[in-house]
Image (cartoon, grey):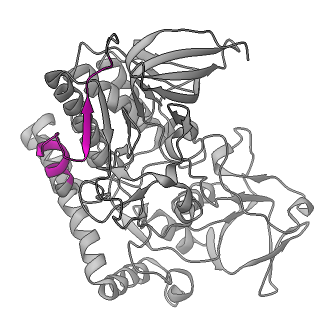
Amino acid sequence: MSTVPAAGEHLDVLIVGAGISGIGAGRYLRTELPDRTFAILEARAASGGTWDLFRYPGIRSDSDLHTFGYEFKPWRDEESIADAPRILRYLRETATENGLDEHIRYHHRVVSASWSSDEARWNVEVDRADTGERVRLSAGWLFCAGGYYRYDEGFTPRFEGRERFAGPIVHPQQWPGDLDYAGKRVLIIGSGATAVTLVPALARTAAHVTMLQRTPSYVMPVAKRDPVANALRRWLGEERGYRAARRKNIAQQRAVWRFCQRFPKTARRLIRWVNTKQLPAGYPVDEHFNPPYGPWDQRLCAVPDGDLFKAIRRGTADVVTDRIATFTERGVLLASGRELEADVIVTATGLNVQALAGLALSVDGRPVRLNETVAYKGMMLSGVPNLAFAIGYTNSSWTLKVGLLCEHFCRLLAHMDATGTAVCRPEVSDPAMPTRPFLDFAAGYIQRVVDQLPRQGDRMPWLTSMDYHSDVKLLRTGRVADPELRLERAPAGVTA
């Protein structure tokens, strides 16, 4: 990269990432604070984030689009569990309809950001993949909307003897467009959302698909089409029908999660009963669909119209629960001594979590260590000025929380305008406040990096809420001013 110029363009807000969160943040800024200057920096060559990055067969949402979609833009498709192309089209329509296309700068990867208290601004270094240069921008605020995982590589554990396998080994995050699996035996290693999506999609043309899992997951069939939501749209019109369907599904998600948390044994029995009805008679349900943890300790895997179970019933797919001893020339040898032969192996083994898009942050020359910070209202960091980030729910639709965070962010900026302040810094008033991990979630991809993430406290505003209705009170209708949020004017001679 070329030398960084001494000075560059200044913007009120820099949004990092042009995925579902970044496009949403841009729309709220454009609507609520139209006089603010902003840019959306996207490292890749296209918008859409996850929905443009992942290209594996069958890629689709595992949340309904009436809640996973934006509150301000109705989801008009008949199918509420949608594939990636439909979601991507929806996101890009949102960007165009809200005049965001001109604000998105592609091939712009944010490398680092340093806060200067003397200047009351972030100085941001950006690598441009299209020109090969490094540029510097400055901004009053950073809004990190890059999601929570690395885009350049997924997680693959070390497998003994991997180099011995004669066929292709692929990770879904780097799915090759020319991979030929038609008429072949495919072995998918994994048991999460990606694995249960891939199995029925590949089983349509593969000779046979086997899902090899070390630990079972909870898997539940969901309808691709929501008949109540579609009826509401017909009766009430697009706007009112969408709002009604959204309220219904928010309540439904909340009720299911609370039921599973309050009555885990009953929930486990109900899920097992549903699985038994979906699977062939005599199928070993407890071996392959009975996790050792409680329902919603990890995210439930949704299978649209029970497609995974249908593939198992047809005999085009099966599930094996065991551990891998080693890869072989023909497949994998299991701890039980059984060998699974395959022509193609897919390692659907998860994501690499990465907070704040992997940015190197510093405040007045001191590096920010995320695990030494505490999250304020689930959207800012203690001791770090003028920085917001978007992290959605783990127990419900991601976008429900992101929308509320974007609203609150705009309310905060408007409040600062009204009070003549330019710097906003959350500060924990009680240094003895107990803390715990930012996300109380047992999924492996979180547990692998939990010690590198911010913390949360034991009281508001330092708790990370996972309840939509609580967040509506906190972020939409609650006061912006807070005793643990320090607001300051810009230093003398600095124009905010």
Residue at image point 27% right, 40% down: 403
Find out whether residue 472 is within the magenta segment: yes
Q: Nearer the viewer, residue 227 or 238?
A: 238
Looking at the image, which residue sits at the far left?
236
In the image, taking residue 316 as reference, residue 20 lies left or right, namely: left
Residues rendered magenta in the picture: 471-491
From the top left corner, tell me how far across and down residue 153 is, in percent. 67, 45
Count all numbered tags in the image, as a single digit: 0
Quadrant occupied by the C terminus: top left
| Quadrant holding the N terminus | top right
Mark yes or no: residue 74 visible.
no
Instruction: Give percent across and percent down for residue 474.
Output: 17, 50
Q: Is residue 183 left or right of residue 4?
A: right
Q: Nearer the viewer, residue 242 or 123?
A: 123
Residue 339 shows in this picture: yes
Tell me which residue sits at (41%, 73%) in the image.
297
In the image, residue 172 sits, relative to residue 73, either above or below, namely below
Magenta stretch encompasses residue 494: no
Residue 349 quadrant: bottom right
| Residue lying at 81% horizontally and 52% vertically, measured from the top left | 168
Give 337 or 4, whichever is nearer the viewer. Answer: 4
x then y, percent, for residue 167: 85, 56
Q: Position of residue 296 (x, y in %)?
A: 38, 71
Residue 59 lies left or right of residue 184; in this view the side is left
Dividing the picture into quadrants, the one containing residue 253 is bottom left
Furthest toward the bottom, the residue is 282
Foreground residue among 238 and 397: 397
